[in-house]
Amino acid sequence: MSTSDRDIVRDVLLGDREAFGHLVQRYQDRLFSLVLMMVRQPAGAEEVTQDALVRAYTHIQDYDDNRPFYPWLATIAVRLAQNWLRRHGRTVRRESVSLDSAQEPSATAAVLTTLITNERSRRLWQAVAALPSGERTTLILYYRDEMAVRDIAAALGVTTGTIKTLLFRARRHLRARLGTETISHRETST
Amino acid sequence: MTCAHVLGLIDAGPFADYSRAHVRAAWQHARQCATCGPALEAATALTTDLATLPQPAPSRYLASAVLARIAQAEQAPPASVAAAMPAKRASSRTRDWSAWATALGGLAAGLVIVLSMAYGEGAPANIASPRFGGVTAGLVMPSMTLEALVLPAGLGLYVAGLFAPLSGRSRS
């Protein structure tokens, strides 16, 4: 039986640094792919993921163990990714502003898809990667990372209404791109 | 309930603030409708696909790099603190020195000014006068040449003491 996040955090707080390694192993893939979706550059994503994990360790005493660990970690990573984008001269628009923005060029999406071998997953990943940044991040946090709308809003510094609108639009965009394909897949599989 | 309502609800997904009755009615419509049925099915499939969206793996060195950085951070103060340390130490040294310089300079300058006022320019350099109540009997007033050196030196130290913390801050 795997140890709970809360137990691990308790051990870390008692001075067991090695225990934090379990949390790193548990969340590194999830965190890396979230950051990768945001910064869209593997080297940058690696750097931000490392920074987020180190920062989580050095601020572990600030973590409220009544809440799940991952949303707290993801919030750190999202903020560091936003800083990274600013540092590298990429504008981070407020999610509410980016609602009506034109879609960003997905030149780097090709780089991301090299990391995914499954053809169908790659197409879905490409479609998600081509979404505007706010929609992309929100979609990953809500569907894949199963974070609550309220937690995503807190992480991105916007209202819950904005998150719901972003999710609504993201779904519409994705359905427009993948709708037929998804339907045909389901029909053939049943 | 119309198709437009149901399609709108499908797009809004589970995060929309609809009542259970509203959602149930929409789903019932979708099951019987040739347009909404496939749309609902596609939406459900999309939700499943998104939940299982693949996670590209980072390099296999990420975990060890993180743990190494943590170990390093525990041995030394955090980078931000470490970066601030030399400046902080230099600045406190400067502050100590400047406090002494200010005190000594002020004392020296003050002493010279008081003695100058007491005796006037060109007064004999004898401070064993009754005006001092005999306490300083036997002491000799420093010569005017010495006074001329102590006054600017004292003032110089005082001014240096005032500006020293500023130069310390500008280095950091």
Image (spheres, coloured by chain):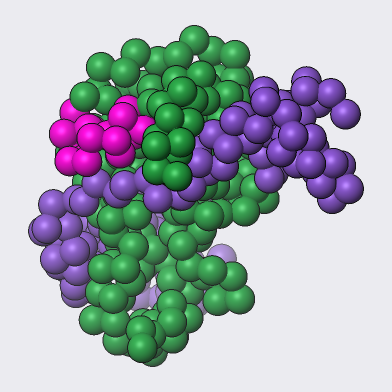
- Inspect the magenta stretch and tell me whether residue B107 lies in it: no
Question: How many discs appear?
Answer: 0
User: Which residue is found at the position 77% from the left and 23% from the top?
Assistant: B3
User: Which residue is found at the position 40% from the left and 15% from the top?
Assistant: A104
Q: Which residues are magenta?
A: A111-126
Which quadrant of the rendered structure holds the C terminus of chain A?
A: top left
Which quadrant of the rendered structure holds the N terminus of chain A?
A: bottom left
- Pick the front one: B60 or B82: B60
A69 left or right of A24?
right
Residue furthest left as drawn: B61
User: Which residue is found at the position 84% from the left and 50% from the top?
Assistant: B20
B164 left or right of A66?
left
In the rendered image, residue A94, in percent from the top left (x then y), is placed at 56, 26
- Pick the front one: B136 or A173: A173
In the rendered image, residue A112, in percent from the top left (x then y), is placed at 23, 33
Quadrant housing residue B43: top right
Q: Colour of chain B?
A: purple
- Pick the front one: B36 or B92: B36
Question: Main SS of the magenta segment?
Answer: helix
Quadrant housing residue B101: bottom left
In the rendered image, residue A10, in percent from the top left (x then y), is placed at 44, 85
Which chain is rendered green in the image?
A
